[in-house]
Amino acid sequence: MVEGRSQIVELQRAEERLDDLSPKEIVGQLDKYIIGQREAKKAVAIALRNRIRRQRVKDPALRREIQPKNILMIGPTGVGKTEISRRLAALTSCPFLKVEATKFTEIGYVGRDVDSMIRDLVEISIHMVREEEVRKVETEAQRMVEERILDALLPRPPDGVDKEREESWLRSRERFRQRLRAGELEDHYIEIRVKQSPISQINIQEGMDQMVIDMSEMLSGVFPGAVATKRLRIREAREILFNQEADKLINQEEIRARGVKRAEEMGIIFIDELDKLAAGGREERAGPGVSRQGVQRDLLPLLEGSTVRTRYGNVRTENILFIAAGAFTMAKPSDLIPELQGRLPIRVELHSLTQADFERILTEPEDALTKQYRALLATEGLELEFTKDAISEIARIASELNSRLEDIGARRLQTVMEKLMEDISFETVALEEGRRFVIDAQYVRDKLAGIVQDLDLSRYIL
């Protein structure tokens, strides 16, 4: 009963974080980092808000029947598919995992099985809950760490010593405490005891996820783990000691239960490169097609709702939101097996980026490339300025290259900007402190014109 109440409270906390975010406001938050793609933003915002609406349905039987509507994003690379999903999860406390469909193989083949994505999501969720609980006990844990460091620097006198010697030890301890807080002892060595997992030294190959779970459970019961003494600098020992003390102050079982529940009810899994599983169409018979279709069949139960065994217990997947994405240039969504298509009912198409989009991407987002380069070079005393015509020229070149070469979307801006900034970044240290450097359209043309005109060279450099 207590566990049930804690899980309800956990979901209410997650709900409170979204209380003030309507779908329109969610889109507004995404607009701060992603230019365009209004339809995709709208679809994911509705999907996120519907999860909160589901939690508020009073009829438990009806609430169990309401499942998230999984989304399929269709569009070329570099247009914002991954970024939309990542930023969406960052708005809330939703556990988020990005995987690539090409990493998985069907059962019977060497490689990762699709169930491993659920186990990874649960690990992320439990880590999130643990971090939240650690923040609550941080002050007490830091105090306990300080005491342990002082004990290592100046061991306590044995019981029964005379009062004068004990008082002398207390005075010395306080002097050490002041020096420790002043940062004077960070390079001093101390010895600490560290517990080692019995399975930590075993080299695990990819694709052996379930074997690891079984082996870990078995060995943890037989061998509780060896304790080793390590000699470390105080600055290096602090984090280890903090984790040890924090673990004493938090309820590990409750954290695991809440983490599993949060993964089940609020988890988001982004499956990229789904189109690679459909390459060749449904009728493909030779080559790796069997494996592709096998992975699709293995994915289907997860999207429909199944139970996956993890080291923390069984996890139900029917309320996890799956967002799949792919360029679908060599294949079509209809090339996926029909059952999988049916489990991705919401389809949104993301459009290729234009020159106007590139201009906005370079200046408007809070993490725009021009802002990043200005911040980087400002650390070395160089004030960097991009003129409006320089932004337009960079956008024009990136758009032209995407039309002449492969269309890699906004990622083309990164290659163009890196080449443009190469000489400035290399010579910055030699420039005078406080110098101002203006990048205009002529500078952009001088640095990039030759490469852009030589198509063969562009293929290798840009």
Image: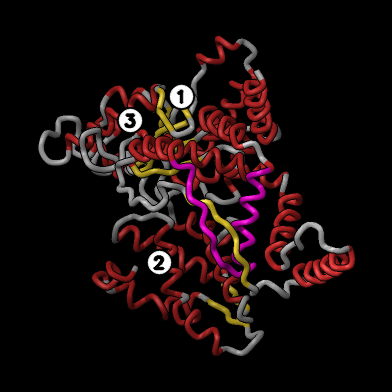
Q: Quadrant of the N terminus?
A: top right
Front residue of 154 and 1: 154
Question: Which span is picked out in magenta?
Answer: 223-248
Asked whether, in this view, residue 462 is left or right of residue 379, the answer is left
Q: Residue at x 88, y 65 (%)?
A: 167
**Which secondary structure lies at badge 2?**
helix
Find out whether residue 231 is within the magenta segment.
Answer: yes
Residue type pointed to by label 1: Arg
Front residue of 274 and 302: 302
Alpha carbon distance from label 2 to label 3 = 35 Å
**Which secondary structure lies at badge 3?**
helix
Front residue of 56 and 352: 56
Q: Quadrant of residue 221?
A: top left
Find out whether residue 9 is within the magenta segment.
Answer: no
The residue where tag 2 is placed is 415
Q: Neighbour class for label 1 at 10 Å: few (<14), some, many (≥20)?
A: some
The residue where tag 3 is placed is 299
> Mark 1, mark 3: which one is toward the viewer?
1
Alpha carbon distance from label 1 to label 3 = 14 Å
Q: Residue at x 73, y 53 (%)?
A: 144
Q: Quadrant of the C terminus?
A: bottom left
> Mark 2, mark 3: which one is toward the viewer?
3
Q: Reading the chain from its start, which is encountered first: label 2 or label 1?
A: 1
